[in-house]
């Protein structure tokens, strides 16, 4: 998701109490949980877009701490505006490219990772940028606690099939795979829709989902 440049958005992000200071991200590794009022688990969404999913998750699960990560300031600003309208103690944001995620979080610091409607990067030469790629799985392996899981949703079947293939020999296994999440009453219990999920499911696209953990 790329929005038109919003004048002053970088400054507004830098001043926001809800966004971690970009200059000191790496020095916070290992102490993210201490920055929250409760001492619950830490769940992160990578590529959160405008933040609908993570904002609703924070509301539904006050005992869990959430961090939403987004690369673009103009997009992140929308999530910040949601927080200004409806603040949550258990939600913070980071503006960064997730390529550096293994430097920003300490080994085992994260309890769960959400990837929702990740950009497909259709050109082969950009495959390493796809968030469910083997390269990113290796980064998640560093920061996720033992027994932690990664949850990925998308309506893009080509990307999803590729993401499932990435698991072969990667040290990760699928605990759940569905090609039509919304048709499964059990799996839909507690499902929070993302912005893209609302848009594409309303067009009739089936939503694929996997939950993976280490072998
Ligand atoms: N998760 C939201 C949803 O489901 O509605 C937004 C989906 S949008 C297609 C993907 C988002 O991921 C974009 O906002 C994009 O800027 C962000 N993104 C892509 N690659 C990223 C990266 N390497 N680091 C951080 N954010 C990234």
Image (cartoon, rainbow, N blue to C red):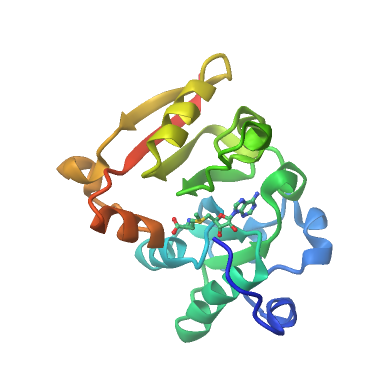
Residue 192 shows in this picture: no
Q: How many marks?
A: 0
Quadrant of the image containing the N terminus: bottom right
Q: Residue at x 45, y 49 (%)?
A: 117
Q: Residue at x 75, y 81 (%)?
A: 11
Q: Position of residue 166 (x, y in %)?
A: 53, 24
Q: Position of residue 168 (x, y in %)?
A: 52, 16
Closer-to-camera residue (61/125): 125
Picture quarter containing residue 25?
bottom right
Q: Position of residue 6 (x, y in %)?
A: 65, 80
Residue 5 shows in this picture: yes
Q: Is residue 75 above or below residue 202?
A: below
Q: Position of residue 139 (x, y in %)?
A: 67, 35
Q: Is residue 96 above or below residue 173?
A: below
- Going by the image, does 112 lie left or right of 209? right
Q: Residue at x 55, y 36 (%)?
A: 132
Closer-to-camera residue (29/98): 98
- Going by the image, does 186 lie left or right of 145? left
Q: Quadrant of ligand 1?
A: bottom right
Closer-to-camera residue (166/34): 166
Residue at the extreme top: 169
Q: Is residue 177 above or below residue 155?
A: above
Q: Is residue 94 above or below residue 114?
A: below
Q: Residue at x 18, y 40 (%)?
A: 184
- Going by the image, does 153 lie left or right of 198? right
Picture quarter containing residue 130?
top right
- Going by the image, does 30 lie left or right of 175? right
């Amino acid at each position: 998701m790329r929005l038109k440049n919003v004048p002053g958005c970088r400054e507004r992000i830098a001043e926001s109490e809800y966004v971690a200071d970009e200059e000191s991200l790496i020095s916070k590794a290992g102490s993210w949980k201490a920055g929250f009022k409760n001492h619950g688990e830490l769940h992160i969404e990578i590529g959160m877009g405008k933040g609908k999913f993570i904002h609703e998750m924070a509301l539904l699960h006050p005992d869990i701490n959430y961090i939403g990560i987004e690369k673009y300031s103009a997009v992140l600003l929308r999530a910040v505006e949601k927080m200004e309208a409806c603040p949550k103690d258990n939600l913070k944001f980071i503006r960064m490219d997730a390529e550096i995620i293994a430097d920003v979080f300490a080994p085992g610091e994260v309890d769960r990772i959400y990837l929702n409607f990740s950009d497909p990067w259709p050109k082969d030469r950009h495959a390493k940028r796809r968030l469910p790629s083997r390269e990113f799985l290796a980064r998640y392996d560093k920061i996720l606690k033992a027994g932690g899981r990664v949850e990925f949703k998308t309506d893009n079947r080509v990307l999803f099939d590729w993401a499932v293939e990435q698991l072969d020999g990667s040290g990760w296994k699928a605990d759940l795979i569905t090609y039509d999440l919304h048709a499964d009453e059990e799996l839909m219990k507690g499902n929070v829709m993302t912005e893209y999920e609302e848009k594409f499911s309303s067009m009739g696209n089936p939503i694929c989902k996997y939950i993976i953990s280490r072998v």
